[in-house]
Image (cartoon, grey):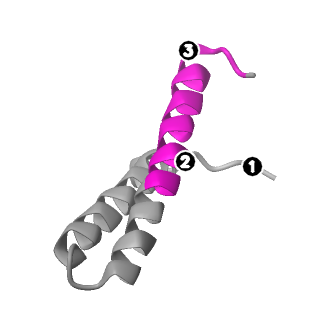
Amino acid sequence: MTEKKASKLAEWRETYGPFAVALACLYSAMTNWGTHWGWTIFFMLGVIICGAMGFFTIKSAWRKKKGRVS
């Protein structure tokens, strides 16, 4: 079987997707700030978790690009 090369959009989504979700959670947390504390806490946790996932995903992608796969 042949492997197909992923499109640019699929590569972007794989690499930067968690950051996009973290930004959406940050926006939602800011709009709910002070009115719905349960949702604010939930979205802030999303910012922290998705932001960390995005950071380590980008770090891994940069290593692969440089040729250092660990």
- Relative side of 34 to 50, left or right: left
Residue bearing the label numbered 1: 2
**Do the CB atoms of the residues marked 3 and 1 lie less than 8 Å apart?**
no
For residue 67, above or below residue 22? above
For residue 8, above or below residue 41? above
The picture quadrant where one finds residue 43 is: bottom left
Residue at horizontal 28 percent and vertical 69 percent from the top: 29
Q: In front: mark 3 or mark 2?
A: 2
Q: Amino acid at mark 3?
A: Lys
Residue bearing the label numbered 3: 66
Q: Amino acid at mark 2?
A: Met
- Tell me the element at label 2: helix
**Do the CB atoms of the residues marked 1 and 2 lie less than 8 Å apart?**
no
Magenta-tinted stretch: 48-69
| Sequence-earlier tag: 3 or 2 | 2
Q: Position of residue 70 (x, y in %)?
A: 75, 22
| Sequence-earlier tag: 1 or 2 | 1
Q: Position of residue 50 (x, y in %)?
A: 48, 55
- Tell me the element at label 3: helix
Q: Amino acid at mark 1?
A: Thr
Q: Nearer the viewer, residue 8 or 22?
A: 22
Q: Nearer the viewer, residue 52 or 44?
A: 44
On the question of residue 13 being in view, the answer is no
| Sequence-earlier tag: 3 or 1 | 1
Q: Position of residue 69 (x, y in %)?
A: 71, 21
Q: In front: mark 3 or mark 1?
A: 3
Residue bearing the label numbered 2: 53
Q: Nearer the viewer, residue 13 or 52?
A: 52
